[in-house]
Amino acid sequence: MLEDELEAILSRAYQGDKDIPGSLAHIAHLVGVDFVPGSSDSDMQDLVCLLMRHYAAPGRCRQLWDSLSDVEREVVSLHIWSKGLAPLEHVHEIAQKHGLSQRTGSSQMSSYFYYYFGSTVIWSFLRYYGSYDSPLWALAPTGRCLFQSELTGVIGEMERRYSDVAVETPLFEREARTNDFVSLVRFCNSFKVTTTKSGFLSKGWISKLIQYGGYDEYPSWTTLSPEQASRPEDYLTTYHLVILGQLAGLVSIAEGVCSPSPKAAALISQPREVLAKHIFESYLQATSYDELSILDGLRAQRGHQPSLARRNLAEELKLCPPGRLIQALEFEKHLRLARPDFARTKSRHVVSTFRKEDVRWNDFEYRLMPIILSFFGALGLLDIAWEEGADALHDRDISVSAFRMTPLGEYLLGLSDAYVSSSTNETKTGGFAVLPDFTTIVPNGPERRRHESHFGNILSKVSSTDEAAIFKIDFESMLRLFRSGGSIADLRSWLSASDKPLPKNVLRALDDWERQAGRIRIREVTVLECDDEALFEEVIRYKGLGALVREKLRPAAVVADEDSRAKIRKIIEKNKRFCQDVF
């Protein structure tokens, strides 16, 4: 048969047999194409080109696919998914799974076929595990992607499989911590937060922000404490809070000061999931920040798009099973096959600073992944397990062992139309008790870590032993709650999961605190005052000044908006009067 004859010719050619039966023109006649000799003097090249044109005919790829074995189909799928660029170790994994052993005699391979097939997936499999009479030879030339579209339609989308994972280390959970961004804005509004020459908060201000916000800080070195961190990016919570806050327009750093942005007040007043979505989309699209600043030994060239990797990584996360713990190295393997160029469109967009050769996957993409995942984790899109060692995906210090998508992550990625907080469901499981003396006891059990982490940010801690952690609901607790941007309603919702009904006196105290909140206010204003009432009446009548006055304090003093100070001074000096600042 024609197919058998052509496959036999290709097999013999691969083994280096120069005595190919029939001329090239005769083979062209067999496959039904017009043959025009190429510019090369290599008969082998002309032969392979003829055979490829034959197998690229409509429907021929489907016939070949149906004739392949399971292992051969897996090899071809791997080749298409990775665009021929899958690492050799993936080929070995497939062979080991199917119980294949490496064959000998690969030295018979002709030099031309070695050059033509290069190191593509199909060629690598045939070289080490295949046979010369396999129909897989007909697809080997797809190393040049001539059958890419035909085979893609036959094979379909890449399949991603994840194994069940159990992680011993605590998870970095921040789904319920969106109010930390609110705390960041309020912190910068309450203090004059200065920055270092590098343009980030100093170590002292970082410590104050952590205490003010009441959140958990994680160092990039899992063996160190947050106080031992040496670089801003070593703070896996604070660094990400500030960067994400800048990109979302919550805070701005200018002239050595970190302060709230003009639109911050409107942003932080939005519902939690709306604010989180705004921050997430701002991070995906931002071009003003580049994660390359964390990666040593690399720099960006013209054309580099820092947002490209974030968007592609987010698309790949959509294919992960929601709520299931994913091993980071398995995710990296699938990403490398499905999106080998997820972080760049051209190889020269990112270059090495210490060698001339091209930047490879392990130099750039592999190191970039845990950094972007850590930003997603800080926002609450993922729960992350930080762990060093062979089972962790890491960039020098930042290491991700495993992660799982949160309900907030499903909402932000568009996998669900509405956001339902996981904390609402989880708190129904109990695991703590509130007593009439305002003591909250969290006994040792499966829920302890979650409740202890939540209460530790709000309630006053009394003691912690192997048997239980004990907290106190008091006025200081309410202060921490309000300063972090929380509300009594949030706390009452969490406390409603108590194993026993909440004592009535505790409920009454919560109601009292809620009624008192907001009744007494403090604000910054500009006061305009004069030495006598006559001068005051003259000044108030200056053109344009009356519109800036808000309320009268006494006969010769009024309150104006704080941001109108410069306008008031300009109007007074324009009318030939001195205006002095008094502090």
Image (spheres, rainbow, N blue to C red):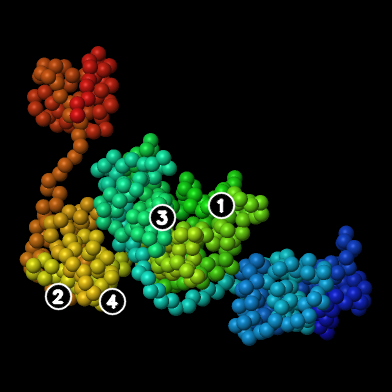
Relative to 339, say whether 552 is above or below: above
Decide if residue 487 is on the left or right side of residue 305: left
* Residue carrying label 1: 297
Q: Earlier in the sequence, mark 1 or mark 4?
A: 1
Residue 558: image location, x then y, percent? 15, 28
Single out the mark in the foreground, 1 or 2: 1
The residue nearer to you, when weighing 438 against 136, is: 438
Give the mark toward the camera: 3 or 4.
3
Which amino acid is tagged 1? Gly
C-alpha distance separating marks 2 and 3: 42 Å
**Earlier-in-chain disc, 2 versus 3:** 3
Residue occupied by mark 3: 234
Residue for badge 4: 446
> Which residue is farthest left?
505
Using the image as rendered, state which of residue 396 and residue 456 is in the foreground: 396
Q: Marks 3 and 4, how far apart in space?
A: 30 Å
Q: Residue at x 61, y 73 (%)?
A: 90
Q: Secondary structure at mark 1?
A: loop
The amino acid marked with disc number 3 is Asp
Q: Residues within 10 Å of mark 1 (few under 14, many from 20)?
A: some
Please state the horizontal and vertical placement of residue 527, each as a whole percent of the image. Answer: 17, 29
Few, some or many residues within 10 Å of mark 4 (<14, 14–19, 20+): few
Distance from the alpha carbon under mark 1 to that under mark 4:
44 Å
| First reached walking from the N terminus: tag 3 or tag 4 | 3
Residues marked 1 and 4 touching at CB (< 8 Å): no
Q: Residues within 10 Å of mark 3 (few under 14, many from 20)?
A: many
Q: Are discs 1 and 2 less than 8 Å apart at CB?
A: no
* Distance from Cα at disc 1 to Cα at disc 2: 57 Å
- Residue 270 in view here: no
User: Tag on residue 500?
Assistant: 2
